[in-house]
Amino acid sequence: MKYLSLFSGIGGFELGIKQAYENMQEIKRIEQNTEQRVLKTIQTRQTEPVSNGVNNSNTVDQSIDFYKINDESPMEMLKRLKS
């Protein structure tokens, strides 16, 4: 890029152009590193299961009436849990 510098301060326009170019190169390098990390993370996580909110396992006790739990006294709940 060609330009005419009419500024005679310390560093001036030339220094600003140089720093802007260096910053741009640094931003590009960071962007590439971030993209590589994201792609690596995506590739390693593809095999992880994703929850769809549906419980397909039989971990929930089907005999529990969740509406009645609110009406139980602490003693009734303890008795039910022990059995």
Image (cartoon, helix red, strand yellow):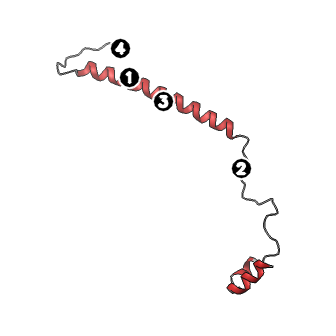
Q: Amino acid at mark 1?
A: Glu
- The CA distance from mark 2 to mark 3 is 30 Å
**Label 3 residue SS:** helix
- The CA distance from mark 4 to mark 1 is 15 Å
The residue under label 1 is 22
Q: Is residue 71 visible?
A: no
The residue under label 3 is 30
Q: Amino acid at mark 4?
A: Met
**Label 4 residue SS:** loop
- The CA distance from mark 4 to mark 3 is 24 Å
Residue lying at 68% horizontally and 82% vertically, measured from the top left: 70
Quadrant placement of the C terminus: bottom right
Q: Earlier in the sequence, mark 2 or mark 4?
A: 4
Q: Nearer the viewer, mark 4 or mark 3?
A: 3
The residue under label 2 is 50
Q: Earlier in the sequence, mark 4 or mark 1?
A: 4
Check disc 3: other Cα within 10 Å, few if <14, some if 14-19, many if 20+: few
Check disc 4: other Cα within 10 Å, few if <14, some if 14-19, many if 20+: few
Q: Nearer the viewer, mark 2 or mark 4?
A: 2
The image position of residue 76, as x and y in percent, is 73, 86
Total numbered labels? 4
The image position of residue 73, as x and y in percent, is 69, 87
Depth check: 14 or 81 in front? Answer: 81
- The CA distance from mark 1 to mark 2 is 42 Å
Q: Earlier in the sequence, mark 2 or mark 3?
A: 3
Quadrant placement of the N terminus: top left
The residue under label 4 is 1
Write down the quadrant of residue 72 in the picture: bottom right
Q: Amino acid at mark 2?
A: Val
Q: Amino acid at mark 3?
A: Ile
The image position of residue 36, as x and y in percent, is 58, 30
Q: Earlier in the sequence, mark 4 or mark 3?
A: 4
